[in-house]
Image (cartoon, grey):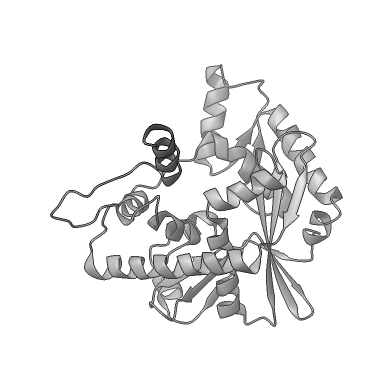
Amino acid sequence: MTASITETAAPVVINGMSADDYHADRNSVSSTSLRKILAPGCPAQLRYDLDHPQAPKKEFDLGNAAHAAVLGEGHDIVELDYPNYLKADARSARDAAYAANKVPLLPKEKAQVDAMAAAIREHPLAGPLFQPGTGVAEQSIFWTDPATGVRCRIRPDWLKKLPGLTLCVDYKTIKSADPETVSKAIRDHAYHQQDALYTDGIWAALDPQDVRFIFVFQSKTAPYLVTVRELTDQNRDIGRAKNERALRIYADCQTTGIWPDWTGPVTEIPTISMPTWAVLNETSEYMS
């Protein structure tokens, strides 16, 4: 990948870009970074995270492996013939897999991933969405935000083109895929921002007739139940407004070279309060 590919102002769609190259690009900003720049995050933390990328974490392996099994793209899976990682040779094999940019799985974990992929294929909504040969997995899309001039990037899990409609299908593994937990996860991880940015990027780069963003959440415990949902328009509009603010902040930081923390430049010590609900409860109980 040359710098000109991601620095050009025109939208670019790249097939076959590795996930590592995509995440390593420093000429564009991702949905994850835009979500980190807003509270409870801050620009200073984002700057540090960009400059100090984390090494792979074991807890991500199941999700990475499930993605590869469902999408047919992603990191290669290596099944290690060990019951656990207590012995040195097992840990050595695991580390060798990491070094080769592969996902190591114990036999019981491999069986779990296979069962999760089977549950997706058998689901009446998710199965047809991810039917092999009907979509493209993990294209890398770059475009320039017209309001700020910031170069943006997205990597849809699955793009499925239908007559007059492009579906962007996002697959996530989660502790429990019950709708209430999914709703909280959307709030906690600002997935409504992801929805809005991915939708906007697809509009900018692919010029479709219409776009719909669909979440597919799957429980990581048997029987690996699946919840398929679309956000309400209001949620997506909120996500888009948050992205617009985050892009303005990011553009300012890039221009000034200043990446402030939560407080920013002040000369007086700010006040702070308990959460509003706690103030109301304790005022009622102790000050009435």
Q: Is residue 84 left or right of residue 58?
A: right
Coordinates of residue 108 in the picture (x, y in percent) = 72, 28
Camera-nearest residue between 288 and 275: 288
Q: Is residue 54 above or below residue 84?
A: below
Q: Residue at x 80, y 36 (%)?
A: 223
Q: Residue at x 76, y 41 (%)?
A: 116
> Total marks drawn?
0
Q: Is residue 106 above or below residue 99?
A: above
Whether residue 140 is visible, yes or no, is: no
Q: Is residue 62 above or below residue 127?
A: above
Q: Residue at x 28, y 65 (%)?
A: 253
Coordinates of residue 124 in the picture (x, y in percent) = 86, 54
Q: Residue at x 62, y 82 (%)?
A: 207
Q: Residue furthest left?
A: 267
Camera-nearest residue between 214 and 121: 214
Q: Residue furthest top?
A: 87
Q: Is residue 142 left or right of residue 40?
A: right
Camera-nearest residue between 70 and 93: 70
For the C terminus, the image quarter is top left
Coordinates of residue 155 in the picture (x, y in percent) = 57, 62
Picture quadrant where residue 210 is located: bottom right
Q: Is residue 38 left or right of residue 77?
A: left
